[in-house]
Image (tube, rainbow, N blue to C red):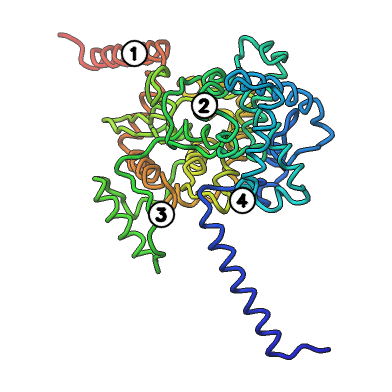
Amino acid sequence: MTETLEAIVDKRLAQLNDAEQSFDKDNKILGPKIQRAPTFLRQNDKCAKYFSPKIISFGPIHHGSQSLKQGERYKLLWTSKFVAENSEKINQDKDVAAKLLLKRLEDNMEELKTLFTEDAIEGYKDNDLVWILFVDGCSLLHFMENFDEHRPESLNLKFDQLMYMWRDMLLLENQLPRRLLEMLSHKNVEYFMSNYWDSGKTKLCGMTMISIQNSKPIHLLDYSRSLYLSTMKGFPTDKYSEMEDINIILNQQQHDADECNIQIDPISGWHTYKNIRDLKTAGIRVMPMADESDYDAWRWNNVSFTPKWFSGELRLPVFVFNDVTPYIFWNFIAYEMCPDVRYNYECCSFFSFMDSLIDTAEDVKELRLAGVFQNLLGTDEDLAKLFNELGDDLPTKMYCDQFYTCAVAYSKKYIFVKDQIEKHYRNKWRTWLAQVYNTHFHTPWAMIAFLAASLALLLTFIQTWFAIHPKN
């Protein structure tokens, strides 16, 4: 029977209502769900490999993968040890303690399922999902509590296994919700996360973790991301309504900048410098933000530019790059691009800013010699390639240049710094003096050669003078 036009219209209108109700339901969930990396990134061959675990899985997304069987054996071992420790604390038999934890998850299964996207748990029966979350949650807590890079045997691992698993636990698709970990442990979840990072801090950045931006991170990746970020005083991140044309946008920029005692020049959004080498030619020195023992030296929003008479100082946060770094950076990007994440692209905006300074291995070399980068990843070309690939198609790319939006947390900060650099770079007198200095005074030998040439020229002038005007 053919549907009437009215029935077809009613069905399509019902789709609109269903979509609105679905979004309203999702917005009632506190915090992002456990989910896959956005399809947009999964389809990118350059970064897709950084989202799948290599040794061990946590959660339902990669559970049962044939390549992760070794990790399953270790999870069962760690779960057994975790339950044994828990049984001693509650003065119960080990099996009784395990059943109590399983019962707790069973009673809260409906709540736990809301913490995952539908496609993440699709095909799993509740009983199977309870067991997966029980084993993965207990084993993750045991790993984090006992992680020690100096004693991998405490987890029955070799060092290489330990570090590969450490890396796998930071992947977006390998996360377990905080609520699950709270149900399984009597300790504060931050205790486990802090030990995991404090013990492995040198693997990614070398910094001592002392505080986090989020008081209650929703999972381990969220906690890790928070360690690099801090609240930017004077740089609001609240959203505002869309502007109709460029003049309104520029007026809004200036209004917001005035509130922060910052002047954004509306005509200097066109940046004529291209990379670190261009800045060096103009007399701009790149320096680390502070001594690397200072925690603020590692904060990604710690970027500043100080103009001087014929030079300038661009200060950047310090980095240690190694084989783990690409995994962490790509998963930060994927996390911020998830549709239910309410952050304002703090990591994405920083990567956009750094991509604007790095083109080739020569730029990385300058940053390495300046003490900003420590490159354990490979060649300088490898590191330059990483930043260039991170910079491709970032949602924040246009907002680290000319246009400011409160939806991107640090766009105002970075635009202001780049605006200061551009003003210095366009000053021809400063650039000329810097070129003279770099040509003739950048090394002791160049200075000696310049002074010798100047002295020779002076002596030649004196000799010529006396030849033309001999004494009587």
* Residue furthest to the left: 472
Q: Secondary structure at mark 3?
A: loop
Which badge, 4 or 3, is on the more N-terminal residue? Answer: 4
Q: Secondary structure at mark 4?
A: loop
Comparing labels 4 and 1, the label whose residue is closer to the camera: 4
Q: CA distance from mark 4 to mark 3?
A: 32 Å
- Depth check, front residue: 276 or 428: 276
Q: CA distance from mark 2 to mark 1?
A: 70 Å
Which numbered marker is on residue 405? 3
Q: Height in image: 70 above or below 332? A: above
Comparing labels 3 and 1, the label whose residue is closer to the camera: 3
Q: CA distance from mark 2 to mark 4?
A: 24 Å
Residue bearing mark 4? 114
Q: Secondary structure at mark 1?
A: helix
Which numbered marker is on residue 187? 2
Q: Are marks 2 and 3 in contact (CB under 8 Å)?
A: no
Comparing labels 2 and 3, the label whose residue is closer to the camera: 2
Q: Alpha-carbon neighbours of circle 4 within 10 Å: few (<14), some, or many (≥20)? A: some
Which badge, 3 or 1, is on the more N-terminal residue? Answer: 3
